[in-house]
Image (cartoon, rainbow, N blue to C red):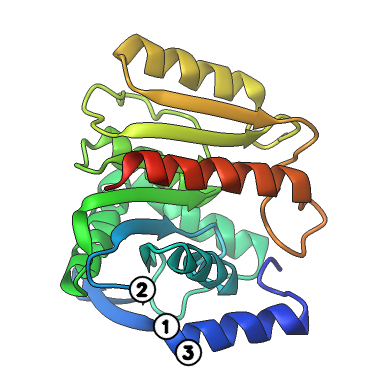
């Protein structure tokens, strides 16, 4: 599982979370959800972070704290529900599949996360959304919805555009960070998205990393690629500096 790190890393995440961040309970249509919020200052720009298909885990908390150390407020959204953190592949597919089939619900959950971040004092008018794998697909869904954010970033995220959708309403810039060796989300899908964005005149940058498979940023996994993780995080950091006030 991606949230199984070394003991040292787990302790680091825990101590940072206790010092600076907090888990936030909120409701969407009467159902409970639990996100994670961390902010170094009251005027920090916001990064809305969307989790992979195993829900909001220590991995997302670690990334949120890394961003907070860089000076950003972060709200890590919960798209599955409080306490729903699937570990079996069939359960992960069930929860992601439900949202892929109900795009209105996916958008509502993302909007609720943004609203919750605002309730914590985050500046939602100076914000970027980013996500990993399934979370990357959710980020692109929000971009297509016309969400008024400054940027949308995916790390090895799903790139397919559902039938009947396009990027004509997209307002922010897109940054797509992808592994050339990704067999789950192919380079054909990558190229097709590039063509779609170009056709609609959407500001975008798309980078692939040679030898990087799917989920190349996930610490502790066999598919983790240190160099691709480092380079993609550096480009993401630059993008935040370029995009946010």
Secondary structure at numbered mark 1: helix
Q: SS class of the residue under badge 3?
A: helix
Instruction: Give percent across and percent down for residue 198.
Output: 39, 13
Is 60 located above or below residue 21 in the figure?
above
Reading the image, the residue beneath label 2 is: 40
Residue in the image at 71% along x and 62% along y: 219
Disc 1: which residue: 20
The foreground one among 27 and 143 is 143
Q: Which label sits on residue 56? A: none
- How far apart are labels 3 and 2 at the CA level? 13 Å
For label 2, count other residues whose C-alpha is less than 10 Å away and answer few (under 14), some (14-19) or many (20+). some
Residue 124 screen position, x and y as percent: 20, 56
Does residue 215 appear in this view? Answer: no
Does the residue at mark 3 contact the one at mark 2 (Cβ under 8 Å)?
A: no
Residue, disc 3: 18
Quadrant of the rendered structure where residue 242 is? top left
30 sits left or right of 35 in the view: left
Rendered position, 150 above or below 28? above
Sequence-first disc among 1 and 2: 1
Percent of width and height locating residue 93 = 56, 55
Q: How far separated are the C-alphas under marks 1 and 2?
A: 8 Å
Q: Earlier in the sequence, mark 3 or mark 2?
A: 3
Distance between the Cα atoms at labels 1 and 3? 6 Å
Is 214 on the left or on the right of 74, as rendered? right
Q: Which residue is drawn at 47% across and 26% down?
A: 205
Q: In this view, does 179 lie to the left or right of 236?
A: right
Q: Do the residues labelled 1 and 2 touch (CB within 8 Å)?
A: yes
Up/down of 184 relative to 22, above or below? above
Residue at the top extreme, as displayed: 199
Which image quarter is the N terminus in?
bottom right
Q: Name the residue located 40 percent from the left edge and 45 percent from the top edge.
A: 241
Q: Position of residue 233 (x, y in %)?
A: 58, 48
């Amino acid at each position: 599982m991606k949230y199984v790190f070394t003991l040292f890393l787990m302790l680091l995440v825990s101590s940072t979370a206790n010092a600076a961040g907090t888990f936030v309970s909120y409701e969407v249509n009467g159902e409970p959800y639990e996100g994670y919020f961390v902010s170094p200052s009251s005027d920090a720009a916001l990064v809305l972070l969307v989790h992979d298909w195993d829900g909001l885990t220590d991995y997302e908390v670690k990334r949120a704290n890394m961003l907070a150390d860089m000076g950003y407020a972060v709200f890590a959204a919960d798209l599955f529900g409080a306490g729903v953190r699937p570990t079996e592949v069939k359960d992960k597919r069930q929860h992601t599949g439900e949202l892929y089939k109900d795009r209105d619900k996916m958008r509502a959950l993302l909007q609720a996360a943004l609203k919750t971040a605002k309730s914590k004092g985050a500046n939602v008018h100076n914000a970027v959304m980013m996500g990993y794998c399934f979370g990357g697909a959710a980020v692109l869904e929000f971009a297509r919805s016309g969400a008024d954010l400054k940027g949308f970033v995916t790390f090895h995220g799903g790139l397919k555009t559902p039938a009947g959708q396009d990027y004509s309403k997209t307002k922010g810039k897109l940054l797509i960070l992808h592994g050339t060796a990704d067999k789950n989300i192919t380079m054909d899908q990558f190229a097709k998205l590039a063509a779609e964005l170009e056709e609609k005149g959407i500001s975008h940058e798309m980078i692939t990393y040679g030898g990087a498979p799917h989920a190349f940023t996930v610490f502790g996994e066999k598919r983790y690629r240190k160099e691709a993780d480092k380079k993609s995080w550096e480009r993401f950091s630059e993008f935040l500096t370029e995009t946010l006030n």
